[in-house]
Amino acid sequence: ETLAYTYTLKAPKSIKPRDNVLIRMCSIECDFAHPLTSKSNALFYEDMQEWKKISKRLYIWDYTVNFTDLLIPHSNFQVLGDNLRTLEKNNVIGVFEQGDGYNQDAAFAALKTWVICKLMWDPRLKERLLIKEFLEGYYGKAAPYLAEYLDVMERVVVDQKMYLSCSISKPTYYNAVCLTKANEAMQKALAAVSDNPELLRRVRIQYLALQHLLILTKHQFAMRDTSVPGIDWQNIAADFLNLSDETGNVFIGENSKMSNTYRDSLANLAAASLTVRKSTPPSSCVKLAEGDWVDFQEDSFMLIGEGSWVNVAPDTAASNGAAAVMPGNIDQWAIQLPVQSNDIIAQTVEIHASIKVKAKATSGLAFTFGVYDQTARKSPANMNVTVDKIPDSEYHEYNLGKVQLKPGMFIYLAPPNNGDLVDTVSVDRIFFTAVKYTR
């Protein structure tokens, strides 16, 4: 899908659309934490300039939420006004801002819709003032605390200089410090309107997204010996599910309702112990200094098609007792690891993965391992590992080679799309090692 958009975004060199032809550009590959004029969105902006030269009817299909998980915070308020002003300056005649068309209101969907509508009517309005106006008018005394909450969430993506996709399944970029501050602000908001049933209901709906996020990140924090204090872990999943049912906020992703399996998995995540088995260092990192390598376990992976294309399963052979497992009969990049600025331990790193393949044949493709640069729209490194190179059905470390990492890249792994060749591909960990140059 990504490559298809890449091929059709470019303006043609030798043809020109007639004046009655509307050209619709989609920003699906963009970084939604930064404006369209930023470096991370340079290729999209350049493509828009080229289309503008040959078309009088340029229309933009933009994306304003996280379609993979609609019920976690998606901090892009800081770019909404800038982007619409940029489109106006570039003679765009129409914009479709696609948001959450499934849930009643969660993750501040109503606020986002209201701000966008105001800005589309007049892009010169100040989005900060619009946000303030809506919060005060709709949430009453809870407004200043909800503003504080939104600011905490925005700082997460801005301070990390992260590349914010519109399709994120694992919110690994949040840490316990920011979520502690967010939870404190949300609790103050709830307390501020505790005597007003209608306003309390409105704030509780916004609490849904934070509850969901806290459940999803609990295991991730436990692996790092941190946690968010003051959480009622015994009841948080039930509270989240009951309120979701009551308010109709039951779509996890685009056209994807909460299944019974998903509901059970949330309950299990919330009930899991805060004490987890610590991972052992990769064999190639045992003698390295602490700052010269960084490890990512399955809790950090983005799992695309979780439940069908990939699952996290217990595995005693894995370094921390669990692994992400893909069936051999798909070829999707079902395991991805987005690169954030604080993951870049050196200008150049080597990218490794610990992988186990249960093969059924003696030849043919076993798995694909690579890194994709969303900003440049290309893959600077990739490898296809064949079954004959797999020594046994145990974990082995594979080295993708030296790469200059930057935010907006992601590591990917995919099976061969042939169940006759491979039963499963299990990924224990992905890790980076610093490349140091000496004269």
Image (cartoon, grey):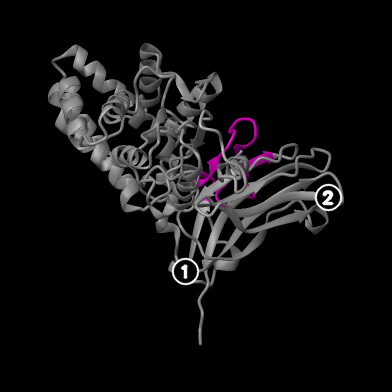
User: Is any part of residue 168 visible from this angle?
Assistant: no
**What is the quadrant of residue 185 in the picture?**
top left
- Residue 315 point in image, percent of width and height: 63, 44
The residue identified by callout 2 is 364
Q: How many marks?
A: 2
**What is the quadrant of residue 291 in the picture?**
bottom left
Residue at position x 60%, y 41% from top? 8
**Residue 140 appears left or right of 291:** left
- Amino acid type at circle 2 is Gly
- Residue 130 point in image, percent of width and height: 20, 31
The CA distance from mark 2 to mark 1 is 35 Å
- Residue 2 point in image, percent of width and height: 59, 42
Point out the residue furthest to the right here.
362
What are the residue bounds of the magenta stretch?
297-326
The residue identified by callout 1 is 347
388 or 266, which lies in front? 388
Q: Which-is-in-front pick, marks 2 and 1?
A: 1
Residue at position x 55%, y 49% from top? 320
Q: Residues within 10 Å of mark 2 (few under 14, many from 20)?
A: some
Location of the N terminus by quadrant is top right
- Amino acid type at circle 1 is Gln
Q: Secondary structure at mark 1?
A: loop
Q: Secondary structure at mark 2?
A: loop
Residue at position x 53%, y 20% from top? 259
**Residue 324 appears left or right of 406:** right
164 or 308, which lies in front? 164
